[in-house]
Image: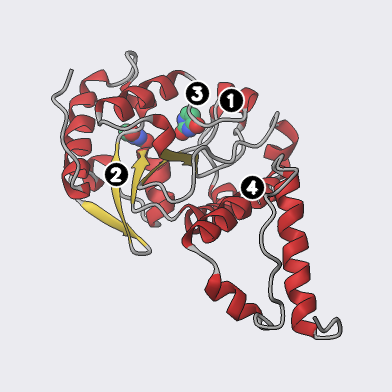
Amino acid sequence: MNNTDPSDDSVRRQLLTRLRHLRNAGIEWLPRAAPLDFAAASKTEAVAQECSEGDLLESRRLALITLADEVKSCTRCAELCSTRTQTVFGQGEPDVELCFIGEAPGAEEDAQGIPFVGAAGQLLNRIIDASGFRREEVYICNILKCRPPGNRTPLPNEAANCRGYLDRQLELVRPKYIVALGACAANNLLQNTISVGKLRGRFHQYKDIPVMVTYHPAYLLPHRSPQSKREVWEDMKMLLQKMGRPVPAKS
Ligand code: URA
Ligand code: URA
């Protein structure tokens, strides 16, 4: 192995970075493998080409952890970073088929650091369940990673500050379908100002990903518009059909 070859150095740096990520993720040992032939893989590109799908998925998982860490120390919104208990990055694994995007963490999410764990979250769980998914097989995140004080609507500059995180998050998760929950999620993701009532019932696009818009689960709570659950179920059926999944009989 030629220690002065700059491409060796670059490979070594990447390996060290990767090992550091693994250690941060709690992985303290790795199974022994045959020694790498650095001479044969002298170019980083060659190494990348030899990466299996599993390696690539693992890199995206690590990149998501790194991005979540970056978000943890974000101070772009002076008010939000001084009032939050913690950031709420998202929940789920990369490469899932379906991603739900909400508005912003509420009190319970701010306390636990997990999206959709309060009252609206319980309703979202029922929607996920009724559609034949397990919560562990979808990805869940929000437009904002911090709770707005008193659960006020996110301000346009807050959504803009957080947008880069969302775009990178979606690039790493790479969902095949997105559900935008409510007007805040839909309008920010799709960059329009159209109401949920007018956006639902057809598919939209975020980059090349089909987006379905439906009502926010908080809107379906008893004191607001529980009768709109019927429309949410219609929307989920439309999505399941597009995904080629069976439509469970409504319980
Ligand atoms: N409402 C949202 O939009 N997101 C959450 O995470 C919780 C409630
Ligand atoms: N208005 C919203 O902002 N969200 C909904 O889900 C319904 C109406």
Local packing at callout 3 (Cα closer than 10 Å; few below 14, some 14-19, many 20+) is many
Q: Earlier in the sequence, mark 4 or mark 3?
A: 4
Quadrant containing the N terminus in the rendered view: bottom right
Three-letter amino acid code at the position of disc 4: Ile
Label 4: state its secondary structure.
helix
Spatial CA distance of label 4 from label 3 is 20 Å
Q: Nearer the viewer, mark 2 or mark 3?
A: 3
Residue 117: assigned label: 3
| Left or right: residue 115 compared with residue 43 | left
Q: Nearer the viewer, mark 1 or mark 4?
A: 4
First in sequence, mark 1 or 3: give its number.
3
Mark 4 or mark 2, whichever is nearer to me: 4
Query: Does mark 3's beta carbon lie closer than 8 Å to ligand 1?
Result: yes
Labels 1 and 3 touching (C-beta < 8 A): no
Task: Determine whether label 1 and label 2 are within 8 Å by CB.
Answer: no
Which residue bears the numbered disc 4? 65
Q: Is residue 54 visible?
A: yes
Crowdedness of circle 4 by 10 Å Cα count: few (<14), some, many (20+)? some
Q: Give the labeled residue for mark 1.
A: 150
Inspect the image, locate mark 2, and give the three-letter code of the amino acid beneath it. Val
Judge left or right: residue 217 versus residue 40. left
Q: Residue at x 47, y 38 (%)?
A: 103
In space, the residues marked 4 and 2 are separated at their CA atoms by 28 Å
Q: Kindly check if marks 4 and 3 are in contact, taking CB atoms under 8 A apart as contact.
A: no
